[in-house]
Image: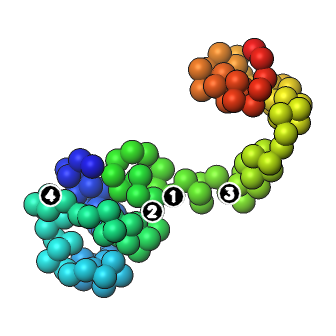
Amino acid sequence: MENAIFATTLKALIASRGISQKWLADEAETTEATISRYIAGKNQPEISIVVRVAKALNVSVDYLCGLTDMPNPKESLGVEMHMLMRCYGRADSGDKKVLWTVLERYMTPEEKENPISTSFAMASGKRG
């Protein structure tokens, strides 16, 4: 984990939410001085602290570590998307092919050419 990214993200979250370092320390079960050192980039937190900070701030660990720009991907997707993903995960390869056939109707040409889309299609057993 990049110390500077964690420090910058943590500082921005504290400022944007108007919370105190003391509040965050209490929620993350650590000390205010420890939070201050993280914000200053002087210390690198253990993963257990990163997880507790993420839970307290309702963001993902990936967001705190600079691996995504989405603070909380689960909330960003919504209930319908989570249900679709769970159902897709349980579908057999034949049903996945049917689903991809339907989804292709709604894809832009760029999405059809995107290697990420192709890898999803290949993972589903669909031949391009």
For marks 1 and 3 on the same chain, the one whose residue lies earlier in the sequence:
1
Q: Nearer the viewer, mark 4 or mark 3?
A: 4
Q: Where, by quadrant of the figure, is residue 45 drawn?
A: bottom left
Q: Position of residue 124 (x, y in %)?
A: 75, 31
For the residues labelled 1 and 2, the Cα–Cα distance comes to 5 Å
Q: Are marks 1 and 2 in contact (CB under 8 Å)?
A: yes
- Between 51 and 72, the one lying in front of the other is 51
Secondary structure type for disc 1: loop
Percent of width and height locating residue 83: 76, 55
Quick one: label 3, few (<14), some, or many (20+) residues within 10 Å? few
Q: Quadrant of the C terminus?
A: top right
* Rendering quarter of residue 51: bottom left
Q: Amino acid at mark 2?
A: Val
The location of residue 30, given as percent across then percent down, is: 25, 80
Q: Is residue 116 above or below residue 7?
A: above
Q: For this view, does 34 lie left or right of residue 122?
A: left
**Amino acid type, label 1:** Asn
Q: Residue at x 85, y 39 (%)?
A: 92
The secondary structure type at the circle numbered 3 is helix
Q: CA distance from mark 1 to mark 4?
A: 23 Å
The type of residue carrying mark 3 is: Gly
Residue at horizontal 83 percent and vertical 34 percent from the top: 93
Disc 4: which residue: 41
Q: Which residue is mark 2?
A: 59
Mark linked to residue 15: none
Q: Is residue 56 left or right of residue 123?
A: left
Q: Is residue 78 visible?
A: yes
Does 53 sit above or below residue 107?
below
Q: Which residue is mark 3?
A: 78
Left or right: 41 in relation to 118? left
